[in-house]
Image: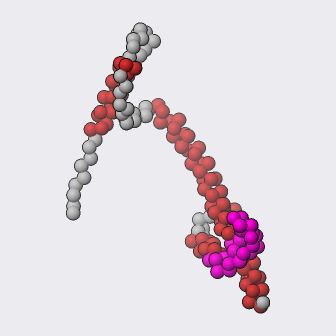
Amino acid sequence: MNREKYVDESWKESAEAEKIKLKDNAPSASRPSAPRQEEQQPQPQRDVTPEPEPEEATPHAQEEHNTEEQGDQADSLNFLNYISSLAYQAMIFLGEIPNPNTNLVTKNLEQAKFIIDTLAILRSKTKGNLNKQESDFLNGSLYELQMKFIEIYQKETQA
């Protein structure tokens, strides 16, 4: 099954020809405006995306650089939000806070343990790849949830 792939690159030539054609047909300030044929008969839309001009590339590259810097901050915030949401779910399953959907306090220690174990796996798999804030938040959340789980589990087994 060793088939060669055929790539039709003639679309590039068609796009360039279309671009030149559009530039030639564009009304200019020096020409008197005549009724356009497009207004008389609607033409089907073509899906041709012109390539960007070289002078557009420089500002766009700077914009991408700024977006990457903001993306780094957004990524760390997303990681913190993810850890926070897992910890929040664990607290619901530990019965520490009411379920926001039902406003009832329910306990599911098995599910709480699963989430706590998930956080422990995340800590071991991301070791050395987190910044200080992320690492401290993950370690602190995991420690608090583990202590709360032990406390609730001991109360459940003694009762």
Residue 82 relative to residue 49: left or right: right
| Quadrant (top left, top right, bottom left, bottom right) of the C terminus | bottom right
Residue depicted at 53% across the width and 35% down the height: 59
- Name of the residue lying farthest toward the bottom: 158
- Is residue 29 part of the magenta span, yes or no? no
Residue depicted at 65% across the width and 57% down the height: 77
Residue 69 relative to residue 24: left or right: right
The way the protein has been coloured in the rendering is secondary structure
- The image quadrant of residue 120 is bottom right
Nearest to the observer: residue 135 or residue 145: 145
Residue depicted at 71% across the width and 77% down the height: 107
Nearest to the observer: residue 38 or residue 140: 38
Dominant SS in magenta: loop
Residue 129 relative to residue 26: left or right: right
Residue 28 in sight here: yes
Nearest to the observer: residue 158 or residue 136: 158
Estimate the x, y position of residue 46 in percent, counting from the top left. 36, 33
Residue 155 relative to residue 11: left or right: right
Estimate the x, y position of residue 105 in percent, counting from the top left. 75, 73
- The boundaries of the magenta stretch are 90-114
Q: Is residue 57 above or below residue 91?
A: above
Q: Is residue 30 above or below residue 23?
A: above
| Quadrant (top left, top right, bottom left, bottom right) of the N terminus | bottom left
Q: Is residue 86 above or below residue 41?
A: below
Estimate the x, y position of residue 81 in percent, counting from the top left. 66, 60
